[in-house]
Amino acid sequence: MKNPDQQNTSASGDDVVADRVRIFDTTLRDGEQAPGFSMDRRAKLRMAQQLEALGVDILEAGFPQASPDDFAAVAEIAGALKHTTVCALARCQDGDIDSAASALTSAHHSRIHLFLSTSPLHREHKLGMSKTQVLDTAVRAIERARGFCDEVEFSAEDALRTEPEFLVEVFSAAVAAGATTLNAPDTVGYTTPSEIVELFRYLRQHVRGADKAIFSSHCHDDLGMAVANSLAAVSAGARQVECTINGIGERAGNAALEEVVMALKVRAPHFGVDTRIDTRQLYPASRLLTELTGQAVPRNKAIVGANAFAHESGIHQHGMLKHRGTYEIMRPQDVGIAATSLVMGKHSGRAALRQRLQALGYTPDDAALDEIFTRFKTLADHGRELHDEDLEALALGHDPHAAGPWHLMQLHTSSHLGGSASASVKLAHDDGHEIGEAAIGDGPVDAVLRAIERATGTPLELTRFQIDAIGEGGDAQGHAQLSARHAARDWRGHGSSTDIVEATALAALVIVNRIERQTPATVAVTRAKGATA
């Protein structure tokens, strides 16, 4: 079913059709300029290449006039991307426009994104301009930019607090001057879905030359409505949405790209539009941004959060085991996540425990399962998630939290600026022998992990490392969480100490101890016995 508010024409010279929404990604501009999300040039290029693999139509690479490094980043990205339109931001000033044009010289397809405030509040207090001056400035800038690039986009900053009649006048002049995309941003995240629908319908009906332009939505999340407002704009005829990976951006952030895209995909019959996004690249893009910025995604984040396809409730797990559609409206594979996770915790039920044990190769009878389930609940009531290695220990009759056989006796690390780090450890084994080893690494954490590997003879491929503070102040404890791969399996461990390197060492020993307590030979014998019982 097609939405009745669909545009029926394409932008001049563009192959955009009425039932497609262009995705304009501003992770590297609006997102990157937010506190805590700065990236260097190398990181920006990696992110840009991932965004092209994701299939974004337009990538706003930065604000060239802001700094020499921003200019260089935009220029490097412009030369590297082959399919995505590369966009540079510019104020309606000659210097900005010339800088943007220069940075985009090598782009396969280029766009200059001009912006100028239009609301009464901004005209008076930010610009000190009259309506006539705003109009003249916008037109002059668009005409100048049009000679330097393939496309010009014009944004009326603070559009949602601008008089609708004046916004029509500005956009009509922008189209006449050569702008092919008209962006009406909710700069401060103030509007509501019903208001944005009303505005976009009004603009499309009254802007002269509206059929020659694409209307765009750019929403901020100050009131938590950025995605809802973006989707409302689409329902009212917007055919470009400006958004960021993980919803990063100024203040509370921008509309989250992954949420907008998956809403349009999952609810396609409702919206009647689609995108060119390869949704299987959403999770990899989210993970890469987390890696580059060091800013974790909340567990409950829609689409890409750790809990998005995880179920702990026994009722939900039972339903999922019967039919996935009972509690999931999309497949994890559609966004690049390997599989649904039935999290084993205090809310989990017997059915989920049996299913997980069977997946691990254990088939206990009802009496054995009752015993395992009782011990499982006792452990889970301590408030933590139990992983596969914990379940295997329960199935084998072991205590998953048992200490040893390896214990940390001594730890020493040293490092210096610009060089490698070294670490030495002394470990004791339950069989009575002690061993000391030393290693060099990229940092003290890497060095201590290498030293433990050498001492125990257990190679570990680190796949996840996270440190969280427990409490406040200089004497607060650090809680280390490690995930490592060994013998084609994933293992997890955690440890706490006021010294984060010691916390890491303790977490690594948890993993090593679990591996040693559950050797392949022991597991194979036990599984064989279970199979014949």
Image (cartoon, rainbow, N blue to C red):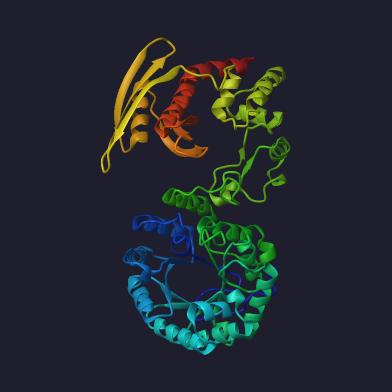
Q: Is residue 530 above or below residue 122?
A: above
Q: Is residue 416 left or right of residue 3?
A: left
Quarter holding residue 74: bottom left
Please name the residue shown 43% across and 28% down the image.
Answer: 508
Number of numbered discs: 0
Please name the residue shown 71% across and 35% down the image.
Answer: 314
> Foreground residue, 19 or 446?
446
Which corner quadrant holds the N terminus?
A: bottom right
Work out whether residue 67 can be spotted.
yes
Quarter holding residue 59: bottom left
Please name the residue shown 67% across and 66% down the image.
Answer: 271
> Foreground residue, 462 or 68?
68
Work out whether residue 361 can be spotted.
no
Residue 418, x across and y down, in percent = 26, 43
Please name the residue shown 62% across and 48% down the image.
Answer: 331
List the single residue furthest toward the left: 419
Residue 164, x across and y down, in percent = 63, 82
Residue 325, x across and y down, in percent = 70, 46
Q: Is residue 47 above or below residue 86?
A: above
Which corner quadrant holds the C terminus?
A: top right
Residue 371, x across and y down, in percent = 68, 18
Q: Is residue 307 above or below residue 278?
A: above
List the single residue furthest toward the top: 432
